[in-house]
Image: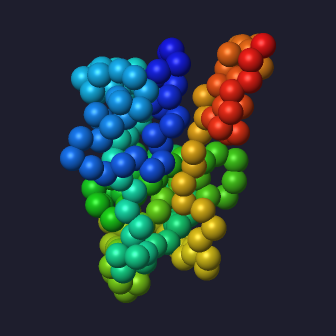
């Protein structure tokens, strides 16, 4: 991954401008062609550096409710349980956690609080497994912005990466 790839990955996680030609705007800013920006983003996605490319909608502003659900799923029922969750569009995340009472967690959104309860009852009916629901009391943060610096192990850290990080954070460039 070169400096341009790092800029594409880390400079445009937030505040991606919505305009007629957003990739052209990025290209002009970093000094490459629009097609090269698009090709590089495609390659970064193919290589797994980019998991998803899209918008994050503030569902609360759109009138949606949400809840975090915790479940104790017996190992012999896990595949069926996950299959049921994956068929429900209202579930945005689901994941396995080991080392605790609850081993499966998921987030659920719906237009009304009553709909959330209805979906939970449906999952319980289809799987025979009790679900604990933890609606949010207050949302503190819903995004995470990562820098190339944070992806490096200490033995991989190069001075150019440190300078890149300083420039990214401070908006200035150091020389050595």
As rendered, which of 91 and 102 lies closer to the eye? 91
Query: Taking 59 as reference, is 29 above or below it?
Result: above
Q: Nearer the viewer, residue 66 or 142?
A: 142
Horizontally, is 93 left or right of 53 in the view?
A: right
> Quadrant of residue 142 in the image?
bottom right
Q: Is residue 149 visible?
A: no
Q: Position of residue 112 (x, y in %)?
A: 35, 83
Left or right: where does residue 8 sit relative to residue 122? right
Q: Is residue 170 left or right of residue 32?
A: right
How many labels sit on residues? 0
Residue at the (53%, 19%) spot, across then down: 3
Quadrant for residue 161, please give it: top right
Residue 54, image x and y in percent? 33, 47
Q: Is residue 37 above or below residue 68?
A: above
The image shows residue 63, relative to residue 30, as above or below, that is: below
Residue at 36% from the left image edge and 49% from the top image edge: 17
The residue at the point 69 percent across, 27 percent down is 173
Report whether residue 154 is seen: yes
């Amino acid at each position: 991954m070169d400096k341009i790839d790092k800029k594409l990955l880390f400079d445009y996680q937030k505040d991606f401008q919505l305009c007629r030609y957003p990739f052209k705007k990025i290209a002009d800013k970093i000094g490459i062609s629009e097609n090269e920006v698009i090709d590089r983003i495609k390659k970064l996605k193919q290589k797994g550096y980019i998991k998803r490319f899209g918008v994050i909608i503030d569902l609360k502003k759109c009138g949606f409710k949400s809840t975090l659900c915790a479940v104790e799923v017996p190992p012999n029922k896990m595949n069926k349980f996950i299959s049921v969750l994956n068929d429900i569009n209202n579930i945005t995340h689901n994941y396995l956690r080991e080392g605790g009472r609850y081993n499966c967690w998921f987030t659920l959104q719906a237009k009304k609080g009553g709909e959330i309860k209805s979906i939970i009852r449906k999952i319980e009916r289809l799987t025979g497994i009790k679900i604990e629901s933890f609606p949010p009391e207050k949302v503190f943060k819903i995004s995470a912005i990562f820098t190339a610096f944070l992806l490096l192990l200490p033995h991989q850290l190069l001075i150019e990466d440190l300078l890149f990080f300083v420039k990214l954070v401070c908006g200035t460039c150091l020389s050595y």
